[in-house]
Amino acid sequence: MNKSHLRYLLVFLAALLVQSTIVKYMEIVHWRPDLLLIILVMYAVQYGRKLGSTAGFLVGVSSDLISGGLLGLGALSKTITGFIAGGVSRLFQERSQFIFTLFLGGLIHDLIYFYINTLGKEVAWRVIWFVHIIPNLFYTAIVGMVIYYFAGRWLKADD
């Protein structure tokens, strides 16, 4: 395991801890940034589909176990997100790839998450889109840009 992978592991563990304890205090209305998704997209952009989907599965299962929600839902949505983020990021220039990939990954993640979480329930998808998915996506993207700005170079360094 090289140093960059070790750094990501430490950041994933820290993000898991912060997501389960501190992020609830960052809530605006009922929107929260998804720190694990941000770090996952950064990892997938750097290391590609295979490692992105593997990391997505491990991070998703870990968050499922801690959150007490539907076991496997986070694992499935984050695995698919890691796979897609790892593949799509190769299509864009270095500067723009992270934020676009974060938006796309966040959208895919939330669509999968809300679709499965609401199966068999009477829901208004317009409400889910405009009250949950889009605001969460923007909040996660803003926090993601800050994290990428401060931690991106350190995580990419492969000494």
Image: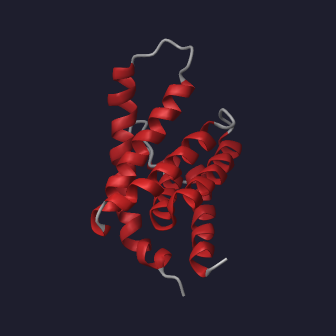
Q: Residue furthest top?
A: 122
18 left or right of 26 in image: right
In the image: residue 50, left or right of residue 1: left
Q: In this rendering, would 117 be left or right of 108?
A: right
* 60 is higher (above) or lower (below) than 126: below
User: Which residue is found at the position 58% from the left and 53% from the top?
Assistant: 53
- Horizontal and vertical percent position of residue 126: 33, 21
Image quarter in which the N terminus is found: bottom right
**Front in this rendered view, residue 39 or 139:** 39
The image shows residue 82 at horizontal and vertical percentages of 52, 52
Instruction: In this rendered view, identify the residue nearer to me: 24 or 44.
Output: 44
Indicate the position of residue 159 as horizontal and vertical percent values.
Answer: 54, 88
**Farthest-out residue, bottom:** 159
Residue 138 appears left or right of 49? left
Query: Residue placed at 36% from the left, 64% from the top?
Result: 146
Q: Position of residue 116 (x, y in %)?
A: 56, 27
By what rule are the colours in the image chosen? secondary structure
Q: In this view, does 135 lie above or below 92?
A: above
Residue at position x 53%, y 22% in the image: 118
Q: How many marks?
A: 0
* Up/down of 113 relative to 88, above or below: above
